[in-house]
Image (tube, helix red, strand yellow):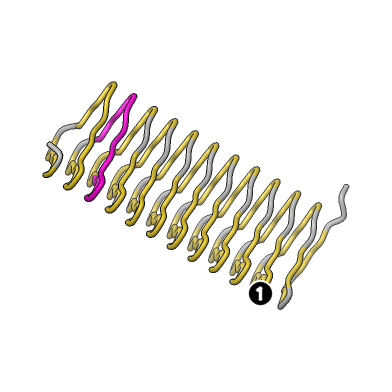
Amino acid sequence: MNTGNVTVDISNVTVDTGNVTMDTGNVAADTGNFTADNGNVTVDTGNVTADTGNVTVDTGNVTADTGNVTADTGNVIVDTGNVTVGTGNVTVDTGNITVDTGNITVDTGNVIVDTGNVTVDTGNITVDTGNITVDTGNVTADTGNVTVDTGNITVDTGNVTVDTGNVTADTGNVIVDTGNVTVDTGNVTADTGNVTADTCNITADTGNVTADTCNVTVDTGNVTVDTGNTHVNSHVRKLTTHSPQ
């Protein structure tokens, strides 16, 4: 069935070794789960949607070329593989978007989580044209990068954290209302835009905080660099630079 829908009201779509594939149509489960142990969940033109449940792939990919990957109350989970959207959104209302080893990639669209986390252990969170937005939760990449070419990285209540890698916004802003922007080994960089933390800290342990044409601003908190530089052409407020121990 290449043209049409795969719809499950109260049940599960499970593939041990193989693929769930739809060329034109939707893969939708109202109450249930999409699970692929060794394989892929793929939609060329359409949506992958789980209202109450999970979209889970152990070894494989969750891919929507023209459409959305959506979980209202549940999680989008990939152990080894990628969550990829060509033109559309990766959206979770209450739940998490989690990739252990792989990437979350959106070409033209958004990565949106209302209440939950966007997490990549080993890999990258990348949006070419669009936004990474979390209302209540965290954007975390342990080994990898959080990158937006044209758009914003925004967290209302939570943190943007990278252990080994970079937080980069080429044309846009890195904004955290209540929380921290933290990079252990790497850089926090905004080429054309702002790095802003209203109530929190902007911290880079080993790396740089750089804004080429913009501002680095902290209303209540600190801008801290342990080993590295703070370089801003325009404006810095509340700067604290520690010498290497």
Q: Is residue 150 above or below residue 71?
A: below
Name the residue located 48 percent from the left edge and 34 percent from the top edge.
Answer: 100
In the drawing, does residue 175 fall left or right of residue 47?
A: right
Is 235 or 72 nearer to us in this picture?
Answer: 235
Q: Position of residue 161 (x, y in %)?
A: 59, 50
Q: Residue tagged by mark 1?
A: 213
Is 186 or 92 nearer to us in this picture?
Answer: 186
Q: Is residue 94 above or below residue 42?
A: below
Name the residue located 20 percent from the left edge and 40 percent from the top edge.
Answer: 22
Question: What type of secondary structure mainly makes up the magenta span?
Answer: strand
Q: Is residue 81 above or below residue 229?
A: above
In the drawing, does residue 183 fall left or right of residue 42?
A: right
Residue 38 belongs to magenta span: yes
Is 42 or 138 nearer to us in this picture?
Answer: 42
Residue type, numbered disc 1: Thr
Residue 145 belongs to magenta span: no
Q: Is residue 118 above or below residue 179?
A: above
The segment highlighted magenta reads 33-49
Q: Position of residue 96 (x, y in %)?
A: 40, 45
Residue 176, image quadrant: bottom right
Residue 77, image quadrant: top left
Secondary structure, mark 1, is strand
